[in-house]
Image (cartoon, grey):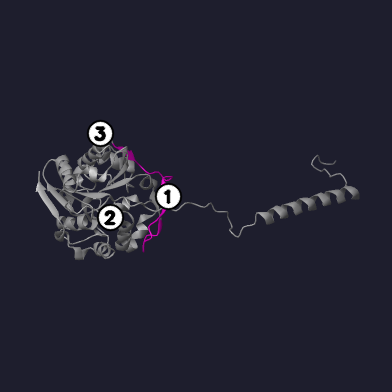
Amino acid sequence: MPSKYDKREPGISRRDFLLKTAATCGLAAAAGGWGYVFYSRDPVRRRDTKIFTFRDYRTEIRAVYPQLAVVRGRDTEKMVVAAIEKIGGISRFIKPGERVLIKPNAAWDRQPEQGANTNPAVVAAVVKLCHEARAAEVWITDVSVNDPYRCFARSGIEDAAKRAGGSIKIATENDFVDTDFKGESLSIWPVSRFYHQVDKLINLPVVKHHSLSRCTMAMKNLYGSLGGQRNRLHQDINTAIADLSSAIRPTFTLMDATRVLRRNGPTGGNLSDVTIEDTVVAGVDIVAVESYGLRFLDLKVEDIPFIQIGEKRGIGISDWRSLNVAELNV
């Protein structure tokens, strides 16, 4: 008894066979033609992407003002106001209608007392000054190492900045654009797009020990602009930091030395590693600001290769004592 699965295809005539063969050949020829038209040497067609470069965020140099302002005191807001006033006042740097990006160190899931991030009171004071200068928008951002939402919350920066009228900008994976640093170690690298959407950039580092570079202050704080696998840059970290400082030229730098993480940086964690210095340092010369901060960590310029590289490139002057420096207590 034949099975129900034992079926045979009906026969095909010679005429039908020739017609089907002709149709198949026609389709093959058409496919070959389209393949020739769209042929590319690339295995996968690539989409062209724009390569960005940094604008120069600096303002006109004015010799009438001190190049460095060092202010000591207990009231953080008064210290910040006095330091910026000494180097020309906020209106020298921020014009009405400008969009301002503030870059604190907000890399770590730590509380303010642990000294791993910029003092939130410093951030709030600068945000207020920008609004007094009638900035259109004031953004605060960092590419945190730990979870960014926790970093901004636990550091106190989120609450302080919002109370002062600032907007926290946390970069997601879609917020990075290829940017040409034109450096020796850093060439084209993903950077937070917020840097390309503002008129001015204010650098707000904190003074800390760093296990690899020995210190992290004004110059290394710019690492927080980068996405991608930043640990790859650690193989030549001194050149990478100098490349950062060559490409990114902040409007001014205000360095937070109210609390200094002297050991076990950059993350810290123990209050015994933190000293209270109650100092802020402001200036337009990032190398000079960096060099002044070394005193808090018992370091010298000769100990820090990236400062020496930066000075050789003409980024700034390491001998801050040779500059016009204003020092005061408030």
- How far is the residue under mark 3 from the one under mark 1? 30 Å
Mark 2: give few (<14), some (14-19) or many (20+) Cα within 10 Å. Answer: many
x and y percent of residue 308 in the render? 24, 64
Mark 1: give few (<14), some (14-19) or many (20+) Cα within 10 Å. Answer: many
Mark 3 / mark 1, whichever is N-terminal: 3
Mark 2 / mark 1, whichever is N-terminal: 1
Between 88 and 173, which is closer to the camera in this rendering? 88
Q: Locate the N terminus by quadrant.
A: top right
Q: Which residues are magenta?
A: 166-188
Occupied quadrant, residue 35? bottom right
Residue at (25% x, 35% y) in the render:
164
Q: Which residue is mark 3?
A: 163
x and y percent of residue 311 in the render? 25, 63
Q: Which residue is mark 2?
A: 220
The answer to whether residue 111 of the structure is visible from this angle is no
Between 271 and 227, which is closer to the camera in this rendering? 227
Which residue is farthest left? 329
x and y percent of residue 292 in the render? 17, 56
Check contact, mark 3 vs mark 1: CB within 8 A: no
Amino acid type, callout 1: Val
Occupied quadrant, residue 236? bottom left
Q: Secondary structure beneath disc 2?
A: helix
Q: Which residue is mark 1?
A: 177
- How far is the residue under mark 3 from the one under mark 2? 28 Å
Prevailing SS of the magenta stretch: loop
Amino acid type, callout 3: Arg
- How far is the residue under mark 2 from the one under mark 1? 20 Å
Residue 171 forms part of the magenta stretch: yes
**Eyeballing the image, is 74 above or below 163?**
below
Amino acid type, callout 2: Lys
Residue at (17% x, 40% y) in the render:
77
